[in-house]
Structure formats: structure tokens, C-alpha cells
Image: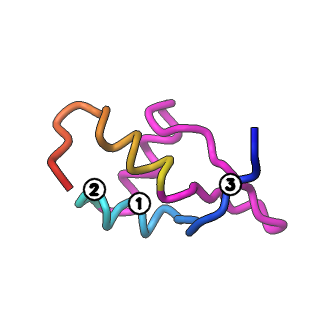
Amino acid sequence: MSPRNGELWSYTEIAAHIGVKPETVKSYRRHGMLPDPDVVTVLGQPRWYADTIRAWSARRPHSRDR
């Protein structure tokens, strides 16, 4: 698999993309509803590539066209 390039999103960017609060995205992760992070920063903060979240968002129930 080749390395991935692109923008990394935090809970805040994911929340803005799907139209919920960051706390909701954190809850999705706790309940196993969010893909595993693509990267975990040195400070332990999870990050996802934008294309990972776009693909997940398109598959999730009640997703809207974006």
C-alpha cells in the first residue's frame, strides 16, 4: 500500500463535514461507529484523512449527499 497524502481531520473537521457537534463524533468513536484513526499524533490526538471520512460518511446511515 502506498503512503497516503492529504489533509488530516480532527473531531472538529469531521463534525463540520457531517453536521454534528465534535462531542457526537467522539461518541461515535467510543461506540465503534467511526473508522480507526489513520494517524495518532505525538500528543495522542487521533486524525483521519479527509478521504477516509468522506468514504465513511457516504456509507453511514442517514448520510446526506455532500
Residue 46 lies within the magenta run? yes
Seen at 63% across and 47% down, the residue is: 37
Residue linked to disc 2: 18
Mark positioned earlier in the residue sequence (2 or 3): 3
Quadrant for residue 58, please give it.
top left
| Residue 11 position in % (x across, y down) | 48, 62
Mark identifier at residue 14: 1
- Mark 3 secondary-structure assignment: loop
Q: CA distance from mark 2 to mark 1?
A: 6 Å
* 35 relative to 17 in the view: left or right: right
Figure check: 42 above or below 26: below
Disc nearer the start of the sequence (1/3): 3
- Marks 2 and 3, how far apart at CA: 22 Å
Dot 2 lies on which element?
helix
Amino acid on which the number 3 mark rests in the picture: Arg
Residue range highlighted in magenta:
21-50
Q: How many marks?
A: 3
Comparing labels 1 and 3, the label whose residue is closer to the camera: 3
Figure quadrant of the C terminus: bottom left
Q: Which residue is labeled 3 in the image?
A: 4
| Residue type beneath disc 2 | Ile
Q: Residue at x 41, y 60 (%)?
A: 14
* Figure coloring: rainbow
- Compared across the picture, whether 64 is left or right of 56 comes to left
Tell us which disc is closer to us: 2 or 3.
Answer: 3
